[in-house]
Amino acid sequence: MNELTGTTSKSTPITTQELIDEITAVDRELLRCPSCQYVIHQDGYDHCPECGADADMRDICQHTINAHRNRFKLLWYTHVAKLPLEELCCTKCDYRLVGLTSNRCPECGIEFNWDNVCDAAISKTAYLFEFQWYADPLKSIAKTFWLGVASPFRLWKSYPRTDKPRVFPLVLLILIQWLVFARGWHAMALAIDPIMNKFIAVLPSLAKLRMRFTYNPRFESNDLITYATWSVATFLTLQIFVQSNREHRANWRQVLRVFAHSTLFASLCTALWCVLEAVLDSTLYYLPWPKDGRRGMPRIAFEYYSGLGDGVMILALVSVWAMLWIGYKKYLRIPHGWAIATVALFVGHLTTQCIQIASTWE
């Protein structure tokens, strides 16, 4: 069968029977029961006629397509990856390649590889920062942050496993996160500070009180250096598990891609810290906090702010661990990624603390 047949667009989903027909046209022996390997190639079965095990034909078809991806390239990308056919274009001249039976573009004459064409199409539809950092940096960085924070599983589905990660935009993404982490507090404070001061001015019950809400940046250059040290130490620790990476065919560029996306939520935590402190300060209007004996104004004990900050930083570390685990499991296909993430975070944190202690010695 020609590798370009049997495809469909997003608007017309392919049926289970059509999938079965496409697969059996290549080899009638491919569709088998997962339990007893009995050959099944008819829609409507809910149990294997040989062993009686549950049989979902669509799941069997998808498993077969994944297991024989080289024989069902276009079927994989259009059915499993949900890639629209109109996005399959020449990587040089953008000529639409649907329907071709050769590996040469009729427009520009370049010889292409279908895996590269499909990976480029997935990159174009995903609209992530790694692929669109030059063409549309603002939209792509917003999309990447949104998926990393709100839907990490969907984020890793957007990355093709067979492509070669681009090192420069990934390093640039890490640098952007460093900047957001170090200056996120200040950026958020510029908006919250005037809002809090205007809010108290319109409250009749507090009109006589003179409170000042001033949220100043708490991170200086040393904190940025500390974050950079932690990032380098953590990434180098991930490279120690080279045996696991080789066993699952993962290279250092793919590990860099996982690490670059593992701190997306953590980089926003300083801004989140500022918002939560503003919420805590807002309780001055409603809760009976003790008053300052000299000024007669309600006050919140420092321990509440300190505990809030520690809680946010713990949340940041937990989010990095979870993002590393999800990346290793969903993208690198390494089942023990949770243990690798735990060791990497521990070593990275320990190295950072040791460097900080050593730098304070006189």
Image (cartoon, rainbow, N blue to C red):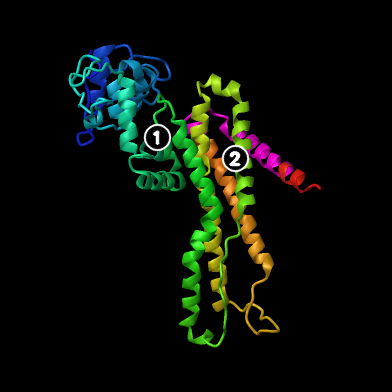
- Seen at 54% across and 29% down, the residue is 335
Which one is in front, 287 or 193? 193
Foreground of the two, 124 or 336: 124
Residue 216 rendering spot, x and y as whole percentages: 57, 65
Residue 231's disc number: 2
> Is 293 drawn above or below residue 340 in the view shown?
below
Task: Find residue 230 and report its horizontal and vertical position in percent.
Answer: 63, 41
Q: CA distance from mark 1 to mark 2?
A: 25 Å
- Magenta stretch encompasses residue 344: yes
Q: What is the span of residues highlighted in magenta in the rendered image?
A: 328-354
Kindly identify which residue carries mark 1. Answer: 157
Quick one: label 1 or label 2, which is nearer the N terminus?
A: 1
Whether residue 46 appears in this view of the structure is no
Q: Give the side of residue 246 with respect to residue 88, left or right.
A: right
Q: Residue at x 57, y 85 (%)?
A: 209
Magenta segment's dominant SS is helix
Q: What is the residue that sits farthest to the right in this orientation?
A: 362
Q: Amino acid at mark 1?
A: Lys
Q: Say whether residue 317 is left or right of residue 147.
A: right
Instruction: Answer with the quarter of the image where residue 210 lies.
Output: bottom right
Q: Badge 1: few (under 14), some or many (20 or more) residues near its Cα, within 10 Å?
A: some
In x, y percent, where is residue 69? 35, 19
Does the segment drawn in magenta span residue 80? Answer: no
- Point out which mark residue 315 bears: none
Q: 126 or 34: which is nearer to us?
A: 126
Say if 204 sits above or below 111 in the image: below
